[in-house]
Every structure is written in C-alpha cells, then in structure tokens.
Image (spheres, rainbow, N blue to C red):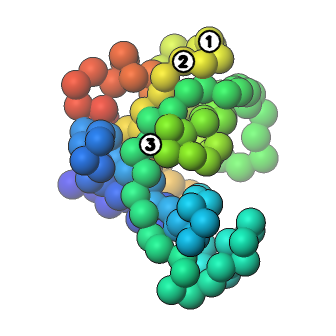
Amino acid sequence: MTSLQYQGFYAEEGTAALPTSPALRAVKSRSGHISFPPQHYGCQLTGDTGENLVEVLLTGRGRLHAQSTVHMHARPVPPVPFTVVEVALEDGPLVRGLLSAAQVVPLQNGAMLVTCLEAVQNEAGETVRDLRFIAETAAGSSGKED
C-alpha cells in the first residue's frame, strides 16, 4: 500500500463518529479552542502551551463554505485544474483542502463533505495517498478512495 503524503495532518483510520473516513489531527486548548493543522507553539486564542494542548482527532465531516477552481498554477503538483474547498467542520474549525478529482464541480455551498484518501503523484513523482474532500453521498459507505 502506498504511504500517506502528510501523516502529521491526518490519520488513515477514522474516529468513532465517522470510522470510514480519515481523521484530521488537531490540538485542543483548555478552553476548547481547536487548531488545525496541529501545532504546539501555543493556542492562538488563549496562549495555552505544553500540556495544556491536547492532541485530538476530528471527523473530517463538514459543510462546504467556499470553493475555487485553479486553472493556472506555478507548480506541477497538483496538476490543474484542481478545486480548493473551505469546509466548516462539525468538530469546530474552518479548514481548507483539495476536492477529490472524482468529485463533479461545482458543488452547492452547504453541501456535506467528508475526507477521503486519493492516490496522487507527489513532486518527486512517487505515488502517495493524500487527503481530499468529497461529497458525502459520492463517498458511498467507505468514505475512502485509492
């Protein structure tokens, strides 16, 4: 099986609430503020650091907030066109990611999206699995793609 592109940002396994879709790794402060991507420099809201930041897994399910399709890009990866989505996660934060190449665009704002893994080429030309978002209905029962 191919490796994950950014293991520090997501986990192949899901959460108890959504076991079939990859989970996002995040940190949570004492006040409950969730930061993604995870970082331990300090909570941007409270300034909590160290043991006051707890690692948590987020479901990766949320509503589409915004989307933009990129037709010209300075780098070869990802290949154009690709769509950047902004997703308001059920677990809290607003995150940005890429839409699955299998997903038909455009989607309606408010559409329910879930995470999936997709086989892609990295800048070294290797095939890796990377996190993408896909409409929950298109993800089917597994929520994962290869």
In this view of the protein, can residue 88 be seen by the observer? yes
Ranked by sequence position, the earlier of labels 3 and 2 is 3
**Element type where label 2 sits in the image:** loop
Label 1 sits on residue? 108
Amino acid carrying mark 3 in the image: Gly
Corner quadrant of residue 72: top right
Corner quadrant of residue 85: top right
Q: Tell me the tag on residue 111.
A: 2
Q: Position of residue 16 (x, y in %)?
A: 25, 47
Residue 64 appears left or right of 146? right
**Element type where label 3 sits in the image:** loop
Q: CA distance from mark 3 to mark 1?
A: 18 Å
Residue 119 appears left or right of 69? left
Residue ID at (52%, 67%): 27
In this view of the protein, can residue 125 be seen by the observer? no
Q: Position of residue 103 (x, y in %)?
A: 48, 20
Residue ID at (21%, 54%): 1
Q: Are marks 2 and 1 in contact (CB under 8 Å)?
A: yes
Label 3 sits on residue? 60
Residue ID at (65%, 79%): 48
